[in-house]
Each structure stands twice: as C-alpha cells, then as structure tokens.
Image (cartoon, helix red, strand yellow):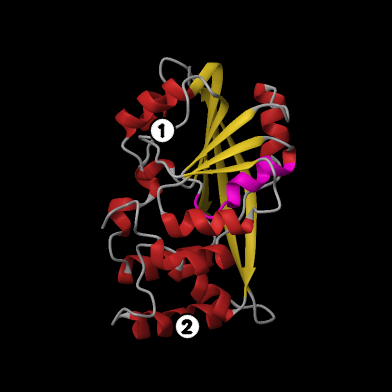
Amino acid sequence: MDNKQRFTSRVNDYIKFRPSYPEAIIPTLQLEIGLIPDDIVADIGSGTGISAQLFLDHGNLVYGVEPNEAMRKSAENELKQYENFRSINGSAETTTLPDNSVDLIVCAQAFHWFDRAKTKTEFQRIANAGAHLCLIWNDRKESEKFQQDYERIIQQYSIDYNQVTHRNISQEIIQDFFAPHKFKKFTFHYEQRFDFEGLIGRITSSSYMPNESDENFPQLRKSIVDLFNAHKQNEMVTFAYNTFLYIGQIN
C-alpha cells in the first residue's frame, strides 16, 4: 500500500475519532526552545490539521505539508478560519518549501511513514540556522487492561500493523536522525472517551485495520462489541495515551 495514499478512505473517521495532542506541548516548547508566535512552523505530514491547530492557536504561521489530497483538503476546510495556515501539496522528502525558511519542524504521528535519509536532507535544507525539530506520537498506554485487550484485537485483525506501527521507531533511530545534535524526550498523559460507535470509528481510522468494506469487518465488529461490553462504564470507555514529545536541533 502506498503510504501517501493509505488514509484516503479513512479521512472522515480520522477527523471524528483521532485524538488531538496535549496543550502542555506549547508551554514545553516555549520553555525548552523559546518558541514564540513569530516563529514559522512546518507541520510535515499534517494530515487533517489536528497538530497544526496547536500552533495556529499559539499565533504561529504554519505550513501544513501533506501529500494525501483527501487529507489536505480536509485540513483546508477544518482550518479555514485561520489566516496563518498555509496548505502545501508536498511530502517529507519533497516539501517544496524554500531554503532556510522555517524555525520549527513538527511531525505528529507521521515520522514513521517517512524515508528518513531523504527527509533529513530535506529538513536540513528548509530549516533556519538553529531551527528545531519536534516529533510527536500519541502511544496507546500499554499498562491499561483495556488497551491490552485492544492490542490483541489489532494483532488478530490487522492488515500490516507490525510492519507500519510507529513503535518500530527506536530511540536509536531517533538519535541518529537528530545527530550530531542531542534530543530531549517528554511524556504527557492524554485520553479520549468513546461510546460504542466512537470506538468503532477509532479503530477504523487506522489504515492497518479492516473498514466496513472489508470481508473481515463483521468479525472485527463482534470483537469490538465484546471489548466494549467488558470495559464500559456508563456506556463509555476511556482510551488512554502516553504522548511522547522529542525535541532537538535539526540544523
């Protein structure tokens, strides 16, 4: 499956059911790298605009670089009220942005899809002197019993989860990407609450899971019914994450 096209059929579920990111990311960047509203941000693999909104609300000019047309058009619609949002048809490897044009590069839930060698060259080209990179992932909290049972369902029904999961990105890979600079890692707590239909939407927003057009979907749905019934409280389940933030210089 072409990584740049694999979310095309998932856009509506992605908008409705994917998590945002902790607001604490902004003050952390203010403290650690001196982020100010005048800084120019490139959000690479910006998808439907979830991560871009954090920086738009802070007052930054944000270039949302997204190769998938359906996701890019969705971001343009979702963020149309922001005059400081620029939608860019580009990719991590070919952003189309000018040389030395950005102060902060953001990759939220996206870095694991990139060709890392080509991406590092491109990031260093577009980054100003002293510019920073932050990598962000919402990672399902493995200590939660609900998430352990959810993981078992993914392993049972997924299409290519083990090949494409962001958990394949090790600390060594991250350090190599930032080299010769070091990085800092921060962990935040984030959660969503879902009714049953929301939980179905959350799982089908993942490109590695069957959706309603797949012959395996009825069996998947039954497993989700059982999962929901086992863990619901007041007809809701809590989807808990550790949000990992990696910050370092890229130039």
**164 or 14, which is in the foreground?**
14
User: Visible in this render: residue 63?
Assistant: yes
Of the numbered discs 2 and 1, the one sitting upstream in the chain is 1
User: Based on the displayed image, in which of its 4 quarters is residue 33 positioned?
Assistant: top right
Mark 1 crowdedness (10 Å alpha carbons): few <14, some 14-19, many ≥20: few
Count of numbered marks = 2
Q: Main secondary structure of the magenta part?
A: helix
Q: Position of residue 166 (x, y in %)?
A: 40, 47
Q: Is residue 147 magenta?
A: no
Residue 249 marker: none
Q: Which residues are magenta?
A: 47-57
Q: Residue at x 61, y 78 (%)?
A: 195
SS assignment at label 2:
helix
Which residue corresponds to mark 1? 171
Tag 2–tag 1 contact (CB < 8 Å): no
Residue 226 marker: 2
Q: Is residue 190 above or below residue 233?
A: above
User: Based on the displayed image, in which of its 4 quarters is residue 206 positioned?
Assistant: bottom left
